[in-house]
Amino acid sequence: MNQRAQTIEHLQRSDEDSSQRRALAARLDTALKRARISSAGAARRLEVSEHDVQFWRRGITVPPLSAFTRIASFLNLDVYRLCTGQTAGATAAL
C-alpha cells in the first residue's frame, strides 16, 4: 500500500474511532445523568480523578474496560450495551 493510501486509511479509521468515542461518551453521560450521579460522585466510586470522568463524558478519552465494568455494575446496566450501544447477541442487518 502506498503512503497516500495509508494516510487516507488512517484518517478514515481516526474519524470512525472519533465518532465511536463520541457515541460511547454520550451513552455514559446519559447513564450518569439518569442515575443522577455527578462526575465527582462517579470518580469517588471508581477511585479515579474527576477530570478522568469529565474527559470520558465528553469523549476526549475512553475509560479502561475495568472502569466500564464497575460503572455498569453501580449503575445496574449491561456493560456490553454501555460499551457498544447494542444488546448482547444482537446482529447487524445484512
Image: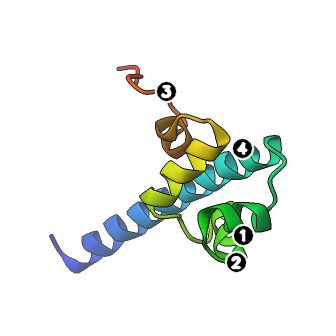
Residue 51 circle label: 2
Q: In the figure, residue 57 lies in which quadrant?
A: bottom right
Contact flag, marks 3 and 2 (Cβ < 8 Å): no
Q: Position of residue 48 (x, y in %)?
A: 61, 73
Q: Nearer the viewer, mark 3 or mark 2?
A: 2
| For marks 3 and 2 on the same chain, the one whose residue lies earlier in the sequence | 2
Q: What residue would you read off at disc 4?
A: 31
Q: Is residue 79 above or below residue 94?
A: below
The C terminus, quarter of image: top left
Marked residue nearer the N-terminal end (3 or 4):
4
Q: Residue furthest left?
A: 1
Kindly identify the amino acid type of the residue bearing the numbered disc 2.
His
Label 3 sits on residue:
87
Q: Residue drawn 40% across and 20% down?
A: 93
At horizontal 56% and vertical 55% (from top left) the residue drawn is 19
Residues tagged 2 and 4 counted as in contact (Cβ below 8 A) = no
Q: Are marks 1 and 2 in contact (CB under 8 Å)?
A: yes
User: Which residue occupies 57% across, 43% down?
Assistant: 73
Q: Secondary structure at mark 3?
A: loop
| C-alpha distance separating marks 1 and 4 | 14 Å
**Are the residues tagged 1 and 4 within 8 Å (C-beta)?**
no
Q: What residue is disc 1 on? A: 54
Q: Nearer the viewer, residue 59 or 4?
A: 59
